Amino acid sequence: MERQIEDLVANPQKHFDNPQDVLLAGDLADDVKRRILESWKLDAARLAESTAENMAGGEESDLREVSKALTQLNAAPRAEVRRPVRVWRAGLRLSMMVGAIVGAGVGLVFLAAAGWSAMPPALLLLETTVIGALIGGIASAIRKVVRI
């Protein structure tokens, strides 16, 4: 499929009669349509430049039509992709579990290094586990915000 898309991007005039046909292609995502039209626009701009310098073979540039199609595509409201809440909650739980495990491991390392006498071992393990879970939850929330 990727090879087919690359061919569409590399040779849009071979696959579409005019730029509006790209917009009407329902089986293509907007980002693929944008790549196709940008490629077509670059070809049309080169042809227009060659024509201005009397180096073209008499072909007419599609620059205006391609620019119009790109404007229409960019003006169209984009479909917002939302992840289901339960997927995020599952990620939150996983992050908190991993954080708790890492926190408990850090607590064990600390107890081993301190000779098991720094404070009651159960209390230290509980504290580091809770802190690890909190850090995991915070990291998960930050990842969610950064993706938005």
Image: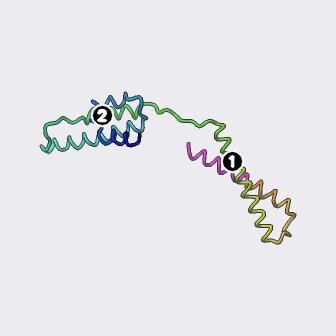
- Secondary structure beneath dot 1 equals helix
Can residue 146 be found in the magenta stretch?
yes
Magenta span of residues = 133-148
Residue 62: image tag: none
Label 1: which residue? 94
Q: What amino acid is labelled 1 in the image?
A: Leu
Q: Is residue 124 left or right of residue 145?
A: right
- In front: 55, or 10? 10
Asked if 52 appears above or below 68 in the picture, the reply is: below
On screen, residue 65 above or below 97: above
When asked about the image quadrant of residue 88, the answer is top right
Which corner quadrant of the image does residue 51 belong to? top left
Which residue sits at x=41%, y=42%?
2
Residue at 80% of width from left, 67% of height from top? Answer: 111
- Circle 2 sits in a helix, a strand or a loop, which is it? helix
Q: Position of residue 107 (x, y in %)?
A: 77, 62
Name the chief secondary structure element in magenta.
Answer: helix
| Quadrant location, the C terminus | top right
Where residue 52 appears, x then y in whole percent? 16, 42
x and y, in percent, of residue 128 in the image: 77, 58
Residue hosting label 2: 15
Question: Which of 38 and 13 lies nearest the eye of the viewer?
Answer: 13
